[in-house]
Amino acid sequence: MEWYSDDDVTKLFLLIIENGYRNFSITGTWQYCDNIEEESNKRCLRIEFNIKCPLSKETDFRIV
């Protein structure tokens, strides 16, 4: 996702925390676009949630 100000990153962080998530990371990057029509810098965020899912048990599956 794109972001435009540091305040937006703070709001996003607080929104995630307020909704009960704790094991996540937010990474900010700069992307430079250099093409003939347009030169621009783009600030992007990557949000990664590290959620553990329980492993399925053999009894969870039914063989037909």
Image (cartoon, grey):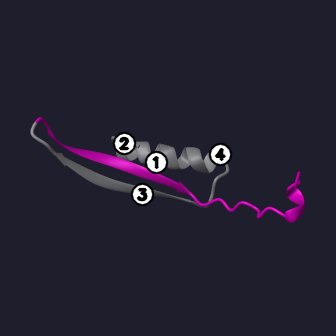
Judge depth for marks 4 and 3 and give the one in front.
Answer: 3
Which stretch is magenta?
37-64
Query: Which one is in front in this view, the residue at disc 2 or the one at disc 4?
Result: 2
Q: Nearer the viewer, mark 4 or mark 1?
A: 4
What is the three-letter code of the residue carrying label 3?
Answer: Thr
Mark 3, secondary structure of its residue: strand
Quadrant of res 38: top left
44 is within the stretch colored magenta: yes
Residue at image point 30% right, 47% down: 43
Q: What amino acid does circle 4 point to? A: Asn
Q: Which mark is residue 10?
A: 1
Q: Mark 2 sits on what residue? A: 2
Identify which residue, 53 or 42, lies in the foreground: 53
- Quadrant in which the N terminus appears: top left
Q: Which residue is mark 3?
A: 27
Q: Which residue is mark 4?
A: 19
Q: Residue at x 33, y 55 (%)?
A: 29
Q: How far apart are labels 2 and 3 at the CA level?
A: 11 Å
Disc 1 residue crowd, few under 14, some 14–19, many 20+, Cα 10 Å = few
Which element carries disc 4, helix, strand or loop?
loop
Q: Secondary structure at mark 1?
A: helix
Q: Residue at x 88, y 55 (%)?
A: 63
- Which circle's residue, 2 or 1, is located before the other in the chain? 2
